[in-house]
Image (tube, rainbow, N blue to C red):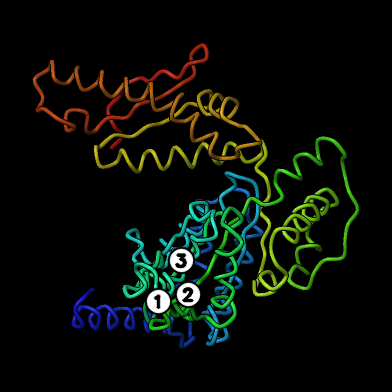
Amino acid sequence: MPFINDVLVDNSQSNQLAREVASLSGLRSRFAFDPEQIRIELEKHIVGQQAVIDALCQQLKVIKAGLHDSQRPLCVLLFIGDTGVGKTELVRTLARCIHGDNNPGFCCIDMNTLSQSHYSAAITGAPPGYVGSKENLTLLNEDAITGSSSRPGVVLFDEIEKADTAVVRSLMNVFDSGKLRLASGTRELSFCNSLVFMTSNIGSKQWAQTARHSGSRGIRQWQRWLPSLQSRLTGRQRSRATVIEEAMHSHFDPEFINRIDRIELFEPLTSAHLTAIVELELRQLNQRLRRQGVQVELHPSALDYLRDQGFDPLFGARSIKRKVRDLLMVPLAEALLSADRLQADKGSEAGANRVAGITLHGRNVDGKIEFDLKPAKE
C-alpha cells in the first residue's frame, strides 16, 4: 500500500500532464492519454486489424471528451477472433500507451483458470462462513482497476469463454453499474474509471468446420450492438461473423451480451500480413539486443524464408513467433557466441561487452539463415 504522500505526488504529476495535453488539444479533459497517439502505437504493433483499432480509438475519443456514463465502466468491449490475431496484444499495448512499460494500471485475469463454478469466489471473494471470507481476497487488483485521476485502469478478462458460466455471470453487475460487491458484503470494487476488455476465440472452430465442409451460409438479422460491422464486411466475412455470432449467443446469456458496449471481430491473418509480422518481430528483437550494442539486419532472402516457413493460418502470428525462435534466434545465438569467442581470443574484456558495437547480417543459404559479422554502422 503506497504512502498518501506518494499518491498525492503521483496525482499531481498526472494532473499536470493532463493539463499539458489539454492545452495542446484545446479540450479540458481529466485524461492525459491522446487517442491519436495511441492509434499510431497500436498500428505499429498490431497487424491486419485496422478496423478494430479505428473502433477502439473512437471509443477513446468519447471517453476523452467526457461523454461516457459516470455510473458504468468507461467502456466494455469484447474482442472475438481466431487465436494469434492480436486480441490480447492489442489490450496490452493499449495499457502500455496509457500507463508506461511497467503497466501499473493493468489487471489481467486468465479466465481459462476459472473453469469450474466454485472459482467464482476467485472474483467475488469467499461467501460468509467459508475460509477467507473475512479477508475479502480476490484476483482483482484494486489499484490497477481504479487507475488514477488522469489514467484509467485497464482490465482484461482473457479467453472469457473458457470460464465457467457462474464466473461469467458474476461480472454482469460490473458491466451494468461499474460496481462489484464482494461476497462478504463489506467491500466494494469500483470499475467506473476502468476500460474493461474481454477476449474470446468462440466460434472460430465452428467457422473453420463450416468453411471446410459447407461453404457460405445465410445471413441473419444483426443485433443492435453490431450494426456498423455488417456494413463493412464482404459476403464471406458476413458469413463468418454470422457463424461466430450464433456460437456466441448459444454460449453466453442474453443478459450478459446486452451489457457489452461493443463487440469487435478480428480478421484472420493472411499471407498479405506476413512480411509486416516478420518485420515487427525483427524490430522487437533489435530492441532487446540494443542494450548489448548489437544489431541484426536481414537480407530479403532471409525475410522471405521466414515468411514462407512461418505462416500457419490455424495459429496466426504465434506460429511465426515460434519459427522466428527456431529459424532465426538459434543461428543468431550461434553467431553471437562465435563473435564472443573471437573477441575473447583477441583479448577483449569478458562478458557481453565483447560483442558490443557489431551488426549481424543474415541471409538465406540453402534453407538456413547464416550471419556475417560486420562492425556496426556509425
Mark 2 vs 1: CB contact within 8 A: yes
- Secondary element at tag 3: helix
The residue depicted at 36 percent of the width and 39 percent of the height is 286
Cα gap from disc 2 to disc 3, whole angstroms = 21 Å
Mark 2 vs 3: CB contact within 8 A: no
Type of the residue with mark 1: Thr
- Nearest the viewer among 73 and 268 is 73
Please determine whether, in this image, residue 197 is positioned above or below residue 26: above
The quadrant holding residue 50 is bottom right
Q: Residues within 10 Å of mark 3 (few under 14, many from 20)?
A: many
Name the front one of labels 3 and 1. 3
- Secondary element at tag 1: helix
Cα gap from disc 2 to disc 1, whole angstroms = 6 Å
Location of mark 1 (residue): 146
Location of mark 2 (residue): 194
Location of mark 3 (residue): 121
54 sits to left or right of 21: right
Q: In which quarter of the image is the C terminus?
A: top left
Type of the residue with mark 2: Ser
Image x and y of residue 253, in percent: 70, 67
129 sits to left or right of 169: left
Q: Residues within 10 Å of mark 1 (few under 14, many from 20)?
A: many
